[in-house]
Amino acid sequence: MKKRKSLLVTLTLVFTIILSACVAENDKSIETEEELEETTVILDWTPNTNHTGLYVALENGYYEEEGLDVNIIQPSEGSSNVLIATNQGDFGVSYQEDLTYAVSTDDPLPITAIAAIIQENTSGFGSIKDKNIESPKDFEGKTYGGWGSPSEKAILKTVMEAEDADFDKVSIIDVGESDFLASTSPIDIVWMFEGWTAIEAELQGIELNYTAVKNLNENLNYYTPILTTNNKIIDEDPEKVEKFLRATAKGYEFSIEDPEEAAYILLKHAPELEEELVLKSQEFLSPEYSKGTDRWGMMDAAVWENYTNFLIDHDLLENKINLEDVWTNEFLPK
């Protein structure tokens, strides 16, 4: 009888310890969840391999490790610059050319570039090979499909005039949802990312003529895309910026080291994308993320100065800007 009572007491103690541990672990989990800081990241477009590192950081728990509950969304209305400037998100994906314009207007947007997603400009002008458009000189009399970027027409005009071509002879339409690669497309030329649309064409067996923007003018080898944030966050919560970039950098470093696994993580979060396109695009882009640098995200003052001077030389800026207020490497992990 004493043995049975002793066994009962022992079992009760064990059960109590296990139950207490479970409750404590549950309380800890709830506490951790409550402590995570809600953070919104606004993309520039639909998900693609420019964004892979963000999704890797989300999937692998890098943001959670930094105490951030990150939600990655597509822009609803307006550009990510405007949405970030108006506090509708914490961090955004943008481009150096758009940000430069945004901070040079009479009512400059309070945003700052905090990291370069890709080190070199991998965009350029593309056209179906049969149309024999080999340089900006051949843009005359053609239809260009644009997306409405504030700097887009200015750069298009500049590269055409550099070859004595008449910008007024180009018909510009909104590319919208049009499929540039479709045989029925009215568009002759688009400004594309080599690591996406050019690969998409290759997979469809379509030959393109492609001219990299950086080859048309060395000052056009700017950062595209970039990550931005609101100046208010920088002033009031710099630690949040550091946490976000620390996790994001890990996401892009993972994507550099294991492009295939990173591609499948992107596909998990954007299952609407074509698998072969994502895999080939990721293979192309992973070496570009930190090309020529020892750390992902780093930006060079010369790149910002060269592009800004290009705009000034062509009377494309409304007002002068102080570049020290436009970009920073301060929050990147050391």
Image (cartoon, rainbow, N blue to C red):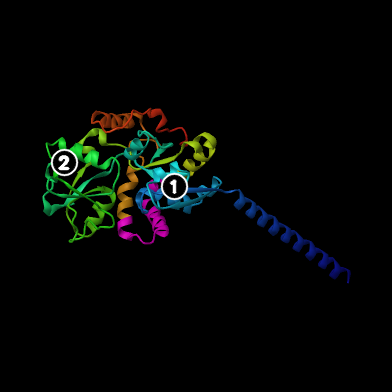
Depth check, mark 2 against mark 1: the one in front is 2
Residue 5 lies, with reference to residue 331, above or below; the image says below
Toward the bottom, the furthest residue is 1
Q: Between 16 and 171, which is closer to the camera in this rendering?
A: 171
Main secondary-structure element of the magenta-colored stretch: helix
The answer to which quarter of the image holds residue 11 is bottom right
Question: Disc 1 designates what residue?
Answer: 251
Q: Amino acid at mark 2?
A: Phe
Q: Between 138 and 286, which is closer to the camera in this rendering?
A: 138
* Placement of the N terminus among the 4 image quadrants: bottom right
Callout 1: helix, strand or loop? helix
Q: How many marks?
A: 2
Apparent side of residue 67 relative to residue 117 in the rendered image (left or right): right
Would you call the spot at circle 1 few (<14 residues within 10 Å), some (14-19), or many (20 or more)?
many
**For residue 19, which numbered disc appears in the image?**
none
The answer to which quarter of the image holds residue 5 is bottom right
Q: Between 85 and 265, which is closer to the camera in this rendering?
A: 85
Lower position in the chain sequence, tag 2 or tag 1:
2
Could one spot residue 214 in this view of the protein? yes
Apparent side of residue 63 relative to residue 52 in the rendered image (left or right): right
Expressed as whole percent of the image width and height from the top left, the position of residue 261 reads 40, 54
**For residue 167, which numbered disc appears in the image?**
2
Apparent side of residue 176 relative to residue 131 in the rendered image (left or right): right
Q: Which residues are magenta?
A: 250-278
The answer to which quarter of the image holds residue 207 is bottom left
Toward the right, the furthest residue is 2
Expressed as whole percent of the image width and height from the top left, the position of residue 295 reads 40, 37
